[in-house]
Image (spheres, rainbow, N blue to C red):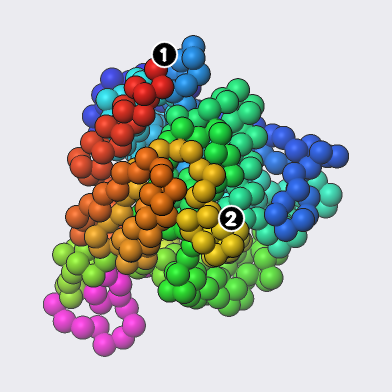
Amino acid sequence: MSEYIEHDKNGVSVGLVEKQFYTFAHPPNEMILENGTKLGPITLAYETYGTLNPRRDNAILILHALSGDSHVAGYYSNDDSKPGWWDIMVGPGKGIDTNKYFVVCSNILGSCMGSTGPCTINPETVLPYALDFPMVTIGDMVRAQMALMDYLEIDKILAVIGGSIGGMQVLEWCVKYPQKVVSAIPLASTTRHSALAIAFNEVARQAIMADPNWNNGNYYSGDKPDLGLAVARMIGHITYLSDESMRRKFGRRLQTRSNFSFNFDADFQVESYLRYQGTKFVERFDANSFLYITKAADYYDLEYQYGDGSAVKAFSKVKAKFLVVSFTSDWLYPTYQSKAMVQAMKKNGLDVSFCEIEAAWGHDAFLLPSERLSALIKGFLGRVHGEIQP
């Protein structure tokens, strides 16, 4: 829960928050993963904001992308210089209004931000799992989240919301647990990765595995594959931007000098920026988790898993109302992919709203301030919640 602070550096905030943990699937009742192996115990890190109302019908589950975590809003201390990753959207009076809704955000299975993943201690060996950690899927992540919702005694979720890989989890929730989800907001997402998206992920994974310190995943007691992970992040970060955003922000501007260095220093501002992003990333993320999560995203194929290749069939049992949002400059998950899922939803007679937002900032646009996106989400949630009021 949060301690209310009326104003912070960015305006209204949920204030101080605390990371919480839920552990389940204790042996011999481990969770059976989609690949047939067992995993347990499993811990999920999560945070909550706002208050669950007496009818327990105002819960919203936010699902994060590749490198995100449970810290979606607020601050851990008064000394924090940076709030949660979607603080612009989650808080009192914001698009996802914590004065009205009870918001839950959990760290996904396989991550390194408090939930069980490859850097977690394996109880059988008392060493980090490393590559002994089983391959997990988007479906496994959602089943773990379902266990958390059961623990919180939330029988129906007013809305599941997420962008990118979080949007995949949104879709998985809707098809796997149609009776549980009242509405859904997938942002900048897709029902399955294109060959282009898989290719970028594979190059990033190869960068990690080519680092001599990777040591087949067993690097936790020594030097870590920082260079490989930094390059992987640089590759990924390029896909999150757009040609226009990079032109506006960097162009061909040089970093510090008026002429070329005629060596391999970072002459251009964009080079320096990418190196900085890579360096900062290795300080907070685990290389093996990067491998596992990107592979889970590449494996995800809602049409194949639930529809025998048909998106229409995949959505045939879904009951949720949808707000689907894409962004004009997102070339990683372009608008045609969102339109395809919307078409399949409408063929099933679902209540679907769709909006393509004009944005220059590429795939990451859903994480940046947008009055239009905030208004869309606030209006959609208000309508959906109003329709279920007694």
Q: Residue furthest bottom?
A: 262
The residue wearing badge 1 is 390
Task: Please state, as top left, top right, bottom left or bottom right, where the C terminus lies in the image.
Answer: top left
Task: Give residue 183's quadrant in the image.
Answer: top left
- Mark-to-mark CA distance, 1 and 2: 34 Å
Q: How many marks?
A: 2
Q: Is residue 267 magenta?
A: yes
* Identity, as a three-letter code, of the amino acid under mark 2: Tyr
The image shows residue 351 at horizontal and vertical percentages of 37, 40
Residue, x 70% and y 54% (percent of image)? 34
The image shows residue 165 at horizontal and vertical percentages of 47, 54
**Closer to the camera in the image, 306 or 107:** 306
Magenta residues span: 258-275
The image shows residue 272 at horizontal and vertical percentages of 30, 68
Q: Residues within 10 Å of mark 1 (few under 14, many from 20)?
A: few
Q: Residue furthest left?
A: 258
Residue, x 26% and y 38% (percent of image)? 376
Residue, x 25% and y 77% (percent of image)? 267
Residue, x 31% and y 61% (percent of image)? 335
Q: Is residue 126 above or below residue 132?
A: above
Q: Is residue 185 magenta?
A: no
Q: Are marks 1 and 2 in contact (CB under 8 Å)?
A: no
The residue wearing badge 2 is 306
Task: Give residue 9's quadrant in the image.
Answer: top left
Q: Residues within 10 Å of mark 2 (few under 14, many from 20)?
A: some
Which secondary structure lies at badge 1? loop
**Closer to the camera in the image, 214 or 61:** 61
